[in-house]
Each structure stands twice: as C-alpha cells, then as structure tokens.
Amino acid sequence: MAGKLSQGEDDLISDINVTPLVDVVLVLLIIFMVTASYIVKESIEVDLPRAAAAGEATGSILALVLTADGTIYLDGARADEAQVRQRVRDAVARDRETRAIISADRKALHGAVVHVIDMVKQAGVSRFAIHVEKEQ
C-alpha cells in the first residue's frame, strides 16, 4: 500500500512511499556496474616519478611509455624503434604541431629515456614533455 490511511476519510497520507525510489536507485546501480567495465581504459603500469610543477598538455599528442625493462609503447601498443620512428613521422606529417609525452618508469635507465627523446626529436617532434605525477 502507498501509505497508512487514517480512520477518517479527510486525513492525509503521512508516510512516504520509498519503493519507487529504491527501484530507481537499483536500476541506476545496475546500469553503472554494467557500463563501468567499458569505461575503464587499459593502461601500462609504470611507476612515474613525482614533481612539484607537473602540468597538463592539450592538442595532438603522442603517448610514449618506457617501462623499467626498456619496452617501448606508443599510444598503448608495444612498438620497436623502427615502428616508433615511422609512426611519429606519420603523425608529424599530418600535424606539424604534434607533441609527445614520454612516460618512463622511475627505474628505467637514464640512457634509455634519452634515447627515446632522441628518437622522437629525430622523427620531427619539436615539442615534448616528460610525464610525471604531481607531488601531494
């Protein structure tokens, strides 16, 4: 029943019916649970170094990731040096303002990071950034 009815016919219903509210909340919860798996983006696990002056970039961006073992990923896909150079050249040919964000694990060798920077610069990217996490 929607609420308590008093003895008299003129009395108002004083209780709130929460059943429709619960139904709506449960439906929203189910929708959220089903779509949450599609929203989550796969990522490559790297332990980024921290910096106090970390910022954000916008525009045409290439995402390069260097793992601790020296593996290179370009836009989420594993790539060797030749593939990185070619894909960066293609991106620069499409957009001269292409930027690169290089994310390197803090345990990656300094020489490997410099090598990735050098590859990107040789392929035509003049603006790049080192991705770090902002210290809290």
Image (cartoon, rainbow, N blue to C red):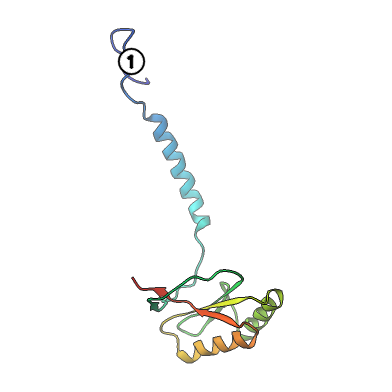
Residue at the extreme right: 93
Using the image, determine if residue 107 lies above or below residue 10.
Answer: below
Residue at the image position 50 percent from the left and 85 percent from the top: 70
Report the residue at 43% width, 34% height from top.
23
Please state the horizontal and vertical placement of residue 19, each as a whole percent of the image: 39, 30
Numbered label tally:
1
Instruction: Give the quadrant of residue 26.
Output: top left
* Residue 37: percent from left, percent from top: 50, 55
| Residue receiving disc 1 | 12
Tell me if mark 1 has few (under 14), some (14-19) or many (20+) residues whose alpha carbon lies within 10 angstroms of its own. few
Viewport quadrant of the C terminus: bottom left
In the rendered view, tell whether residue 70 sits above or below residue 26: below
Residue 34: image x %, image y %?
A: 49, 49
Task: Tell whether 25 sits left or right of 97.
Answer: left
Left or right: 7 in relation to 92: left
- Between 75 and 77, the one lying in front of the other is 75
Q: Secondary structure at mark 1?
A: loop
In this rendering, would 77 be left or right of 104?
Answer: right
Q: Is residue 51 left or right of residue 129?
A: left
The residue furthest left is 7
Q: Amino acid at mark 1?
A: Leu
Residue sitting nearer the eye, 24 or 130: 130
Tell me where residue 47 appears, x and y as whole percent: 41, 76
Q: Nearer the viewer, residue 66 or 123?
A: 123
Q: Vertically, is 39 above or below 136? A: above
Which image quadrant is residue 76 in?
Answer: bottom right
